[in-house]
Image: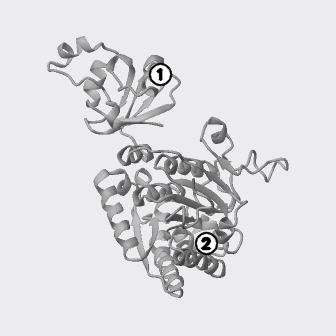
Amino acid sequence: MVTHLGPSSCPRLVVKIGSSLLVDRDGQVRRAWLETVVADIAARRAAGQQIIIVSSGAIALGARRLGLAKGGRASLEDAQAAAATGQIALSQCWADLLAARDMTAAQILVTLDDLEDRRRYLNAAATLERLLGLGVVPVINENDSVATAEIRFGDNDRLAARIAQAASAQAVVLLSDVDGLYTADPARDPKAERIAEVARIDARIRAMAASESSSGMGSGGMASKIEAARIANAAGAALAIVSGLHAHPLDRLGQGNCGTIFRSQSTTPARKAWLAGRLTAKGRIHVDAGAAKALTGGASLLPAGATQVEGRFARGDVIDICGPDGAIIARGLAEYDAAEAQRICGQRSAALPDLLGYAPRAALIHRDHMVLL
C-alpha cells in the first residue's frame, strides 16, 4: 500500500500540473508558486524518488502572446497556434527552474496515437526509462500544435495516467484547483464532505464527478480525473487528487490529511493494462446477459452470446464489449473483422464453418486478449 506517495513506497511518481495553477488570469506563469513545486521535486529526488512531470499551460501562455480570445480555445486552429507559441515559453520555464536546482529537463510531446498504438507506446516507454535512468526529469505535454479533435487526449489528467502506465510508475498526483473528490459540489453544498480514500471506482463515485473545470482555463474537470484514476488503477498505480492552491503542494501531500487517493490492488498484466487504459476503440460488440456473466467469470466471448456488432474493424483491432444495458464491460482484440463478426453474431459454434466457409476460430474475442473494465 502506497502511503502518502513517498519515495520509499513509490519509487517513481508522475506529477500533473493543470493550466489554472501554472498560469494566472493574465496569461503569465505563476513563477513564485512553481518554484515551490520544483523545490518539492528536488527534495523528493534527493530522497530517491524519480519524478515525471506532465505540464499543462502551453495554450494558455500562447493565447496571451497572440492575443487570442477565450484563452486560445475558441477553435481548434487557435488552440494549435497558441500551443505552438506557448510551448516554447513553457519548456524554457521548466528548464530554467529545474536547472536552478541542479536538475536536467527533457521535453516530450505526445499525441493520443502515440500511446494508443502499441509499438509507439513501447517506444515512449523505452524513452522514459532511459531518461529516468540518466537522472533526467521528463516534462511531458500533449502535442496540441498538431493534434486534431480525433486524436487528442483533450485533457492532461488522462495523459498523466497513461504516462504512468508507460513508465511503470507506482502513483500519479494530479495537482488541481480542487482539494480532492467531494460527496457534492462544495461550492454549492456546505454539507459536502471530502472523500479521503477510494478503494473502488463504481457508479456512486462517478456520479460525484462534475463535468466542468472550475477555472475555465483548463480542459479537464472531475470526470476526467475519475477516468484518469481508472486508467492508473488498471495499471496498478495509485492516483491522488490534491489541491495546488498552496505553496509546496507535494510537501503538503507528504504530511497527509489532504486530497483524495484512489488505491489500486490491480495485478493486471502490462498488455492488458494497456488495453484497459486505451481511450479509443474501432468498434463494439453487444452481448446478452448470459455472455456478460460468463465474461466476468473469465470466459472468452463466443459468437452465440453476441447480439449486435458496430463499427468497422479488422482482426486484431481493439473493440469494446457492451452489456445488455449498453455499458462497456470489457475491451479486447478482435479475432474476426467486422463483416465476419456480423455474419456469425448470435450463432452457435457448429454453424460457423458453413457461414464462413473455413474452419473458424472459437471466439470473437479470446479471454487472453481481453480485459474487464
Q: Under tag 1, what secondary structure?
A: helix
- Examine the rendered structure and indicate whether residue 30 appears above or below residue 225: below
Instruction: Kindly identify the residue that appears in the image at 35 percent across and 39 percent down.
Output: 282
Q: Under tag 2, what secondary structure?
A: helix
Q: Is residue 74 visible?
A: no
Q: Is residue 196 visible?
A: yes
Q: Which residue is mark 1?
A: 293
Q: In the orientation shown, which residue stands out farthest toward the right?
A: 190
- Examine the rendered structure and indicate whether residue 103 appears above or below residue 371: below
Instruction: Kindly identify the residue that appears in the image at 37 percent across and 48 percent down.
Output: 270
**Quarter-wise, where is residue 148 in the image?**
bottom left
- Front-most of residues 230 and 345: 230
- Examine the rendered structure and indicate whether residue 231 appears above or below residue 288: below
CA–CA distance in space, label 2 to label 1: 46 Å
Tell how many labels: 2
Q: Which residue is mark 2?
A: 22
Instruction: Kindly identify the residue that appears in the image at 52 percent across and 81 percent down.
Output: 93
- 25 relative to 323 in the view: left or right: right
**Quarter-wise, where is residue 307 in the image?**
top left
Circle 1 Cα neighbour tier, 10 Å, few/some/many (<14 / 14–19 / ≥20): few
Q: In the orientation shown, which residue stands out farthest toward the left?
A: 358
Mark 2 or 1 closer to N-term? 2
- 135 relative to 179 in the view: left or right: left
- Front-most of residues 248 and 186: 248
**Amino acid type, callout 2:** Leu
Residue 77: x percent and y percent?
46, 62
Residue 248: assigned label = none
Query: Depth-wise, is mark 2 or mark 1 nearer the camera?
Result: 1
- 201 relative to 332 in the view: left or right: right
Circle 2 Cα neighbour tier, 10 Å, few/some/many (<14 / 14–19 / ≥20): many
